[in-house]
Image: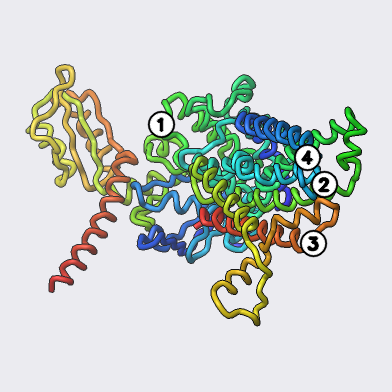
Amino acid sequence: MTQGYWVILRTEIFSLFISPATYVSTFYFLALLGVGFRFFIESFPATNWILPPLSSLALGLLFGAPALIPFLTMRTIAEERRLGTLETLMTAPVDAVSIIAGKWSASYFFYLLICCGAYSYPLLVCIIFPSQAESLGFLKPEHWIGGFVFLMSFGASFCAIGIFSSSITRNQMVAGMLSFSLITLYLAIMAFSYGEPTKIDEFRSYDDLFAMVGGSLHRGLDKIQFFALGVLHIPTILHQLIVVFFFLSLAKLQVEKIRH
Amino acid sequence: MSAETKPLPIIEVLNLKKRYGLIQALKGISFSVGKGEIIGFLGPNGAGKSTTLKILSGLIPADSGEAKVCGVDLAEEGGEVRNHIGFLPENNPLPEELRVIEYLHFRAMLKGLRGSRKRDRIRIALDICDLERKVSERKIGNLSKGYRQRVGIADALLTEPRLVILDEPTIGLDPRQSAVTRKMMERLRGEVTFLLSSHILSEVEACCDRMIILSHGQIVTEGTLNELQEEFINRTIFEVIALTDRMSLQKSVREIDQTCELLQDEPVDVSGKKRFIFSTEKGEVVAEAILRYLVKIPDLRVFEFQIERPDLETIFLRATKKNWEENDLLGKRSRRFKIE
């Protein structure tokens, strides 16, 4: 069945490369990000930003993800369901896991390509203005690696949310809007969750329950401070992997429903 | 052929049941199909044809019963048997943005074909389906319905399947396009087993070795056209074109067969001659004996004589009508029971 995964991955990547919507969204996204990054590094000496300036790029990509990810994922399953080609796909010796994993991997691959495109801005600064790049700390490889791993882990879960949204509807616009809403909500929970996670034996009220359940989300975005300095925060990576597994499992169940 | 040496049937279905919510789509059907047979799968809308075909293609599972393809139970296998099955679903959904050749490459790779074998099989499938090079370079979204159906059939034939399931392959096609499908089946007759579901009965009659007729989730009858004709039409109809009056012709006919009946009150005029239609319960042998007797009588001036065989449409209507009536009776009984 792994042959099915590779074939679907290849075809999905091909579909993303021939889709005008992908190019348009990628162009606007990278253009806006580039302009924002330029103004940020220009005004950086005057700001009280405590993290390395490279982390601004990771945060820009992260907060732009709700607008970008739907363009990469909304067509994947919704369009197949609308056309009925998902049924045809299931008549080949390929299982739902290969279909979901293949489609998710293709979106994720394209997302990483866009991240690479975004990281070309500081790379250009390093090549064209090496002294300024040094003063901004762009020459420290751990900042690059940490920021990129941060984006990789969050991008994986965002793509999984997008694939799940696409699996529950036949309308790609609905899938896109649902994906945007879920990713925004997920970011909001991580951005506004506060307080220490409650241990099970300290559970007394509903507030404690919420804090306990959301414990792993606790100040999720604040973890950028580790990644920005090149420290790989393993609980955050594991948390994102759980989110990936959860949403892809839901999408798999949704695709398998076609068999019944 | 003895029982021990008899080859395994390609399809073996035993007491297959499937329910969608409150609707019992299949009520325990059983049949088997041998290698190289072309089977017409007939039935009114909602009879359970597409459900059976989807189960046999491995797309959906049955609730109970056994469905074996090439000796492998579909409920237990891991998907490999699907390499031996080509399936053209109803409406034939295809990705619009891909070119024909790209789509066939994608499907071939999904089915495990690689390298030169993949290229060869694609070329052969394109050739069998009369898809010339120019068409294979076009986007599927820009193709006519006929060509789209051919692409679907080419996909079904990619892996040299032992069984090809075609669900309404010629629906909405013009006669020329339908002929391409028939030609394809004729070309592969004997090598590949075809299970063809269609509402175009003339087409099924022309190319199928055997028919299975479903109604209300049950098989109402199966057999060759001759067997079905014998089962459902127990009277032989024959027509005589002659230059005589009704009374003298009927009198002559009754000298051979007393039970023979003239079916019209008045004969139909055919270019100055008269056409009489008779019916007998005693079969074609008696009908032929009547002909031999009539031509010996010069006064009757018989010009033409024809024994009519009932077509599949008549058989289909009778077979399914019987089932409809049974179901209706059951309904009435249950309603009556409730009133009592």
Displayed quadrant of residue B139: top right
Instruction: Kindly tell me whether residue A31 is visible in this rendering.
Output: yes
B270 versus B52 height, above or below: above
Q: Residue at x 71, y 61 (%)?
A: A239
Residue at the spot of label 1: B172
Residue at the spot of label 4: A46
Disc 3 and disc 1: Cα gap in Å? 59 Å
Q: Are marks 3 and 1 in contact (CB under 8 Å)?
A: no
**Disc with the residue nearer the chain's start (3 vs 4):** 4
Residue at the spot of label 3: A234
Whether labels 1 and 4 belong to a single chain: the reply is no
A8 versus B277 height, above or below: below
Disc 2 and disc 3: Cα gap in Å? 20 Å
Residue type highlighted by circle 2: Pro
Q: Secondary structure at mark 1?
A: loop
Q: Give how far across and how far down residue B19 sits, in percent.
A: 41, 61
Instruction: Kindly tell me whether residue A4 is visible in this rendering.
Output: no
- Which residue is situated farthest in the front direction here? A46
Q: Are marks 1 and 4 in contact (CB under 8 Å)?
A: no
Q: Which mark is residue A52?
A: 2
Q: Residues within 10 Å of mark 4 (few under 14, many from 20)?
A: few
Quarter of the image that includes the N terminus of chain B: bottom right
Give the letter of the chain under mark 2: A
Give the label, 2 or 3, closer to the camera: 2
Q: Give how far across and how far down residue B20 sits, in percent.
A: 41, 59
Disc 3 and disc 4: Cα gap in Å? 33 Å
Q: Of B92 and B182, which appears nearest the observer?
A: B92
Quarter of the image that includes the C terminus of chain B: bottom left
Q: Of B339 and B245, which appears nearest the observer?
A: B339
